[in-house]
Image: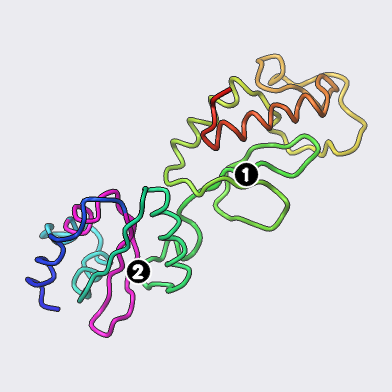
Amino acid sequence: MEREKLLERIRTFPDRPGVYLMHDAAGNVLYVGKAKSLRKRVASYFRRTGYASPRLRKLVDSVSDISTIRTESEAEALITEAKLIKKYQPFFNVELKMGERYPYVKITRERFPRIVITRHREEDGGTYLGPFTRVTEIRRLLRLVERYFPLRSCSRNLDEGPYETRPCMRHALGRCLAPCAGRCSESEYGERIADILLLLKGNTSH
């Protein structure tokens, strides 16, 4: 498709969330991206005259056509984007194709679980939430979780005893329930985990 016709078509894209697929002249998918506004996001690629990244310049020069998929929300767009990247394995989606772009919050499968941030989802029995687009926002949220729902952060195996006789400094600072020293029961700890799951899933009604 000629560049002018492509630009004219982009102007008809909806000002709504969705996913866009950039194709080369042979119809191959070069890149898959998500957008809060399909029209504004896709148009931004063609407004620039200079690109800091040679890879981005090469992508724009290679685009012959663009297709879109409307979604009801940005969250749905994120999920759709990940599925399409997995399906097409586009050359220019290096970061997400390698599974190193969006982080997950993982609640480990242990007697007294921990919360960790990971970029790799595995079949290990843990509970994964996400993926999330910005790790800084997740770290900020987890700092609030630590303040109001203190859990252990150490990797010590607490599935079996013996436990410590004295808790660590984190307990004294109010940042750990000290299950390692028997300062809280498994059921009490489990209640905190349930509350955190509700919080991270966006359910804060109780």
Point out the residue furthest to the bottom here: 26
**Boundaries of the magenta span:** 18-43
Dot in front, 2 or 1: 1
x and y percentages locating residue 164 in the rendered image = 86, 25
Q: Is residue 139 magenta?
A: no
x and y percentages locating residue 163 in the rendered image = 88, 28
Q: What is the secondary structure assignment of the residue under circle 2?
A: loop
The residue located at (54%, 32%) in the rendering is 203
**Residue matched to label 1:** 106
The residue located at (71%, 29%) in the rendering is 152
- Image quadrant for the C terminus? top right
The residue located at (64%, 23%) in the rendering is 149
**Residue matched to label 2:** 92
The crowd level at tag 1 (other Cα within 10 Å; few <14, some 14-19, many 20+) is many
The residue located at (58%, 26%) in the rendering is 145
Give the residue type at disc 2: Phe
The crowd level at tag 2 (other Cα within 10 Å; few <14, some 14-19, many 20+) is some
